[in-house]
Image: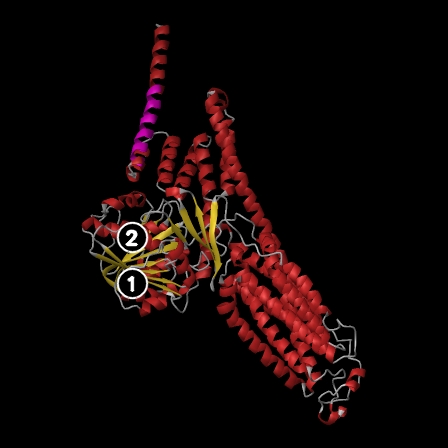
Amino acid sequence: MNGPSAGPRRDERTDLGVPGGDRSAVPTTPAREPRSSEAALLAAVLVAGAATMTVEFSAVRLLAPWFGASAGVWTNVIGVVLFALAIGYLVGARLSSGERPTQRLAVLLALAAVCAAALPALAGPVARVFMPEGVPLHEAAGLLVWGSLAATIVLFLPAALLLGAVGPLAVEATQRARGGGAGAAGGRVLALSTLGSLAGTFGTTHVLIPSLGVRATFLTAAAALLVAAAVVGLAERRGSAPRNGLHGLRAPALGLVLGGALASLGYAPPGARAGERELVAVDSAYQRLRVLESGTGAGRMRFLRVNESLDSFQSVWTPEPGLLPPGHYYDHFALPLAFEGAHAAPARWDVAVVGLGAGTTVRVLEGVVAEGTELGCVGFEIDPVVLSLAREHFELRDAPGREYHGGLDGRAGLALVNRMFDQVVLDAYANNMEIPPHLATVEFFREVRRVLRPGGWVTANLGGFGANDPVVAAVARSAAEGLGADVHLARVPFSRNVTLLARVGAEVPEPGSPDWRFAPHLDQLRGPLELPGAWTRHLGRHGGARLTDDRCPMEWLQLRSIQEATARWASRS
Amino acid sequence: MGLAFVSLCAVLGMGTAAEHRQGQIDLAEAVAVELRAGRFVEALRIAGEAKEPALAARLEADVRWTAGDLDGALAAAQEGLAAVPGDARLASTAADLALTLGLAEEARRHLDTLDGALAGPYWSEGATEETRRWWGERRAGLEGLAVEAEAGLAARDRALQMARWVGGGFVALASLAFGLLLCLPDRRRPRA
């Protein structure tokens, strides 16, 4: 160290760790901390680093029931946390110039613990301000972005700011404790903080949230911060003049009382709607999942809702397998069987499902395959917990020739699979409304083509406002190029979904064409598709944006989709 | 002679009206038969045979709605209303469809049209008590749904406005705080 020795009262009382006790070698830091506190400080920094990442990663999960976990929400959370940390660093820098940075550090850690403990309880009321109940999915686009930003600011800014202030205080205190230059102290603090962040990052995603859930994850972070505050407080107490018994532990004790009180308020994400019963709600590594049931007897239906869901759902179940009530796009996945069955039912029908969800596609096909047709299936679902729920609540049955892969991305899975298929079903969605970009590109459809038998079918569920919708047109164009086939678009009745159909090496029947014939038991699908405008042959490579692995602006296209639909309605009225 | 002519005209006129009405009923029934059979294209073709624009639009909207083409049904109802602005059935169908599609403002416009139509001489005076009651209940049901949809939209707009204020305010205040913390000299010095 450089500069004069500070020589405050307590410095004279303790060995400050300066070799030989030569205080002239400790010039810049007047208020020396006890050397023994260095370990406590570094431990606290480690915990604070972990807690920062836990709060950041869990923030998205905490907000997900209202705003989803889209790239926009992640961006908002990361942006706000970074900004808060930046301000926190400056606040910490100011605070560190005081006489007793270690004591301040303990107070900051305790306050951060209180904030973390309060977050689950505050999330619902705050989120509801920025995302009122009952907003339909197509009206919510602006709110998902702005609302999540505002909620993030209100909820997470204080905790992130406090945690940001930990670093400079810890550097200051460490430097005073161990002597040496600011660089040495800063390097140690940064190293431990980053190590903690690393642990927080992996631990939150892979251990805490899946095993404890979102609320308990925040409470764990809060508890860890409180312990860190207590450790720092005790270290500070040891290094200071004798005081009353609670000295150094007042802030953690107060934090425990306050945090405990706030934590006891619970966490209340959106529950079942009127007429629905919640069968199970669980947090997976990816999302919040709920199985809800409505109706009674044969009219029962179960839905898998994910995160914010709004008025959408990811999977549906009815007591009987087969076609669903009108308005469910899954029925269109049976169109290839309807066309094939009009001639002769195939002996075997192998299907790959990218975005298996809780297995609704399989259940629909199970119910419509002709007697004597063996249904083989390979399904990919990125979230393994969804598969568990599917087996438990959606009657997804294991059988010979059927493989369900949880935790495997559909594209990666298709690349690995060593089977050929008669039909590939694409029904992968992220955040209820976003088609994952890597599952919509020319390159992806080339991979799909590779696993299709000659004459094999591709059926895809696309959320969009008709055949000219920017998202629909772009995926259709990319599919046409990647598959090297004509692409057809079918409007899903009572819905704003469009089904993409294509066939490799053969023609897809069109309304009015000689092949436009349906297997008798699936003839009910025919009528609505024959209405003018219900069926469109896409204009090959000339319509829509070309989506590639290099450039796939799906979020922009989705925004345009909503804007154009709104403009269309406005101009029409 | 004069009396005979008047009587003939009356009979002919009444006969024409009755036949006309029966023709409408037959057409609507023929459409309904096709709809029940799931033959939507045929139903649409029959609907197109209606001579009156209002009836043609009503039937087309019905066919498209039954087939699940909600946008197309609303467009048919809107076109019908453009041709026959005061048609109560079309206005009510359009309002219902708009509410189903979540278009609250659109629904309100059609409800206003419906109000105007129901205030007209036929519905307010010429119709039977039962018909008037039916329309009253229908109107009230649509109004309830419209109010709910409008409240949802208003809540969304308020939330969006508030979120923008919070977002903008945060950026402004945080930037200010950042600048101050960064630039202002630190007056507090550790005790030497």
Magenta highlight range: B18-35
Inspect this view and state whether residue A137 appears: yes
- Left or right: residue A465 versus residue A220 is left
The amino acid at mark 1 is: Leu
Badge 2 element: helix
User: Residue at the spot x=56%, y=78% of the render?
Assistant: A195
Q: Residue A366 carries which label?
A: 2
Rounded to the nearest angstrom, the CA distance separating label 2 from label 1 is 27 Å
Chain designation of label 1:
A
* Mark 2 vs mark 1: in front: 2
Which quadrant does the C terminus of chain B fall into? Answer: bottom right
Residue in the foreground of this view, choosing between A553 and A31: A31
The answer to whether A118 appears left or right of A8 in the picture is left
Residue A464 position within the rendered picture, expressed as x and y whole percent measured from the top left: 41, 53
Camera-nearest residue between A346 and B37: A346
Question: Magenta segment, principal secondary structure?
Answer: helix
- Figure check: A62 above or below A54: above
Who comes first in sequence, dot 2 or dot 1? 2
